[in-house]
Amino acid sequence: MDRVIVVGGGLAGVRTVEALRAKGHQGEVILVSAERHRPYDRPPLSKAVLAGDADDTTVDVDWDELRCEMLLGERATALRPGDPSGGTVVTTAGELEFDGLVIATGARPITLPGPGGRRVLRTVDDSRALRARLAPGVRLVIVGAGWIGAEVATTAARKGCEVTVVEAADAPLSGALGPEVGALTARWYDEAGVRLRTGAKVAAVEPGALLLADGERIAADEILVGVGVRPELDWLAGSGVEIDGGVVTDAAFRVTVAGALRSDIVAVGDCAAWWSKRYGRRLLVEHWDTALNAPTVAAAALLGEEGAEYDPVPYFWSEQFGRMVQYAGYHPVAERVLHRGDPDGSTWAVCWLTGDRLDAVLTVDRPRDLVQARRVMSAGTPVDPDLLADPERPVREATRR
Ligand SMILES: Cc1cc2nc3c(=O)[nH]c(=O)nc-3n(C[C@H](O)[C@H](O)[C@H](O)COP(=O)(O)OP(=O)(O)OC[C@H]3O[C@@H](n4cnc5c(N)ncnc54)[C@H](O)[C@@H]3O)c2cc1C
C-alpha cells in the first residue's frame, strides 16, 4: 500500500497515523483536517480549558518522526471510492488519490433553530470564546442536560455565572442513561446553585433569550446548545459508502461500498458504527476511549493483518459538579437496574443486569468499582446480584466462579 489518506485530524485520525507507522507502514501518509489546529484532545474543552486551568490540549506527537504530511484547514468534500486498487478524495484544495483511506471525520454538534442556535462547544476555538464570556453574574442558559451541558454548568457555576439548564426530557442524562438513573443526578444541579428546568422544549434560540415551545422566554447573556452530536458524513454523499447512523463497518472497521466490503477503506472514531461481536449489534460510541484505542485495529485491518477485531466493553467518563462519573458496558441490553450504595450519599454506583450477567455500570466517585466491573464484564464472569448490591464489598468479590 503506497499512499494512505486519513480524513479528519481528531484523536482517531492521529492515533491511526501512529498505529500505521508502529505497524511498519512505510508508504506515504497524508492527514487532511478541516481544522487549522494540529490534532488536540477535546475532553478538557468543557473542563480545564473552559475553567482557564489549561489552554493547549494539542496531542503530543512528533509529526516529523511519523513522516505524515498534514493538510490543515482543508476539508474533504467528496469521495470517489474507485475500486480496491485505489480511489480519490476530493478536498477544498484539490484531489488526492489513495491506496488506503481512513474516514475519521468525527461528529458535529446538533444545532437549533434561531440565530443563536449554532452556539455549540466542539472545538478549542469554541471553548476559548465561551471562556472569555463567562464572568461572575453572567446569565448563561444551556440547552441540554447531557454530558456537555452538565460539565459546562459545573465550570460556569464555579466562575460565578447564573446558570440555567433547560432540558426537554424529564431528567438529566435521560438519553444516555435512561430517566430513572439520570434523575439521580438532578440534585447535583441544585447543590451547585444551577437552575435545572426539565420537560422544557426549546422553540428557538434568539439573541438574548431562549424561546420555549410554550411561549415562555428565558433571558440570557449567553446561550450554549448542548443537545448531542451527529457523525460528520456529508462529504460521503453519493460515494456508495454504507451509512446507518454512522459509517457502517465490520468488527475491524472496514467499510462497505456499493454492497462490497472494502479492505482498503476503514472508518473509526465518532463517525463509525462498528459491529460489536460482544453485543451482537452495531455500536456508535462517541467517546474518547474508542477514539484512542480503536485506531490500532483499524490500522491493522488496513494493512491486511489477519484477525484484526475490536471487541471491548465500551468506557467513558465525565466530570460534573465535583464528581468523577464513569460508565462501562452497554445498558440497553439489560433487564434490570441494581443500586450499589445510596444515590443520596457521596459515592455510589448503579449496575445494569440481565440475570447474573453484568451489562453495564455507572459509578460516582468509585473508580475501583469501575475498573473491577469492566474486568468482570470483559471476562463475562457471572455475578451474584445480592453481593453486588453491597457497596462495602469489592465488585470482584461479587462474582460467581
Ligand atoms: C467538549 C467535549 C468534551 C468531551 N468530554 C469527553 C469526556 O469527558 N469523556 C469522553 O469519553 N469523551 C468526551 N468527549 C468526546 C471525545 O472528545 C470524542 O469522542 C473524540 O474527540 C472523538 O474523536 P474523533 O477523532 O473520532 O472525532 P473528532 O474529535 O470530532 O475529530 C474529527 C476531525 O475531523 C475533522 N473533519 C470533519 N469533517 C471533515 C472533512 N470533511 N474533511 C476534513 N476534516 C474533517 C473535524 O474538524 C475534526 O477536527 C468530549 C467531546 C467534547 C466536544
Image: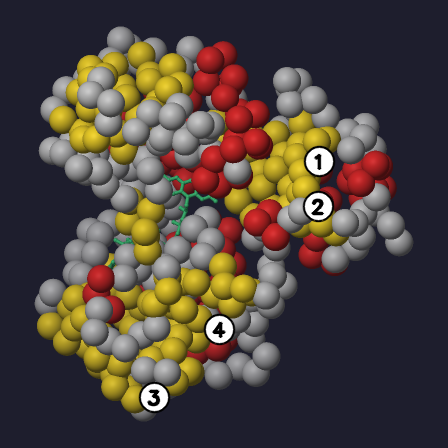
Q: Amino acid at mark 1?
A: Leu
Q: Amino acid at mark 3?
A: Pro
Q: Measured along the vertical axis of the image, is residue 108 above or below residue 19?
A: above
Q: Do the residues under discs 2 and 4 have CB atoms within 8 angstroms?
A: no
> Gap between marks 2 and 3, in whole Å?
43 Å
Q: Do the residues under discs 1 and 3 have CB atoms within 8 angstroms?
A: no
Residue at left offset 28%, top offset 21%: 141
Q: Disc number at residue 43? A: none
Can you see residue 255? yes
Q: Measured along the vertical axis of the image, is residue 212 above or below residue 162?
A: below
- Say few, some or many: other residues with alpha carbon within 10 Å of mark 2 (under 14 / 14 to 19 / 20 or more): many
**Local SS, label 1:** strand
- Residue 369 as seen in the image, left or right of residue 223: right
- Residue 79 location (% of width, % of height): 22, 74
**Local SS, label 2:** strand
Residue at left offset 56%, top offset 75%: 308
Nearer to me, 201 or 24:
201
Residue indicated by mark 4: 250
